[in-house]
Structures are given as structure tokens and as C-alpha cells.
Image (cartoon, rainbow, N blue to C red):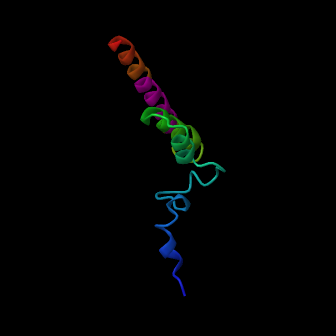
Amino acid sequence: MADKNMFDEAFPQDKQVGGSHYKFFEIQPYEFISKNNLSFFQGNVIKYVCRYLYKNKIEDLEKIKHYCDLEILKLKDAKKEK
């Protein structure tokens, strides 16, 4: 008989390490981020927006602001280079 754990590597999307704060969503943040080719900063905004009510609340909202500021800086720097 097969051990259920043997499928963990075959289906990593069904496993969450460190909590259950993303299990509430029909579409996982990583899937949305990946399928839309979002940048690192954009991806983090999505991730923290999705989880803030279920995990770190205000701290995660602060992280959203931080990653938005980093994305703004990246865009401004790109504009200067042109």
C-alpha cells in the first residue's frame, strides 16, 4: 500500500509550510503571481494582501506598503535610465 506522504513531492501545491493562512483561497497567491508573470515586489504585495487578515494583520499591511514603495522606486529608477 502506498504511503500518502510519498505524494508530497509530486503535488507541492497541496502543501503549505508554516501555517494555513493561504488555504482559505480558491486560487493560491503563488499561482496567480506565476500565471501573471508578476515581479518580486508585485508578488509580495499580492501575498501579503491575501494573508494579512489570517496571519500578521498590521505587520503584513506594513509589508504591503514597503513592497509598494520598493516597486515605485524600481519604476522611478527605470524611468531615469531611459
The residue positioned 54% from the left and 77% from the top of the image is: 4
The dominant secondary structure in magenta is: helix
**Residue furthest out toward the left:** 81
Looking at the image, is 15 positioned above or below residue 49? below
Please say whether residue 50 is one of the residues in the magenta stretch. no
Q: Quadrant of residue 69?
A: top left
Q: Quadrant of the N terminus?
A: bottom right
State the image coordinates of residue 48 (x, y, percent, origin top left).
52, 39
Q: Which region is colored magenta?
A: 60-71
Residue 32, position in %: x, y?
57, 43
- Spot the residue most to the front: 82
Note whether 17 is above or below 69 in the view shown: below
Q: Position of residue 55 (x, y in %)?
A: 54, 47
Magenta stretch: includes residue 63: yes
Q: Is residue 58 above or below residue 25?
A: above
Q: Residue at x 51, y 58 (%)?
A: 16
The quadrant of the picture occupied by the C terminus is top left
- Residue found farthest to the right: 26
Q: Is residue 79 left or right of residue 48?
A: left
On the image, the x and y values in percent for residue 52 come to: 56, 41
Q: Nearer the viewer, residue 25 or 40?
A: 40
How many numbered tags mark residues here?
Answer: 0
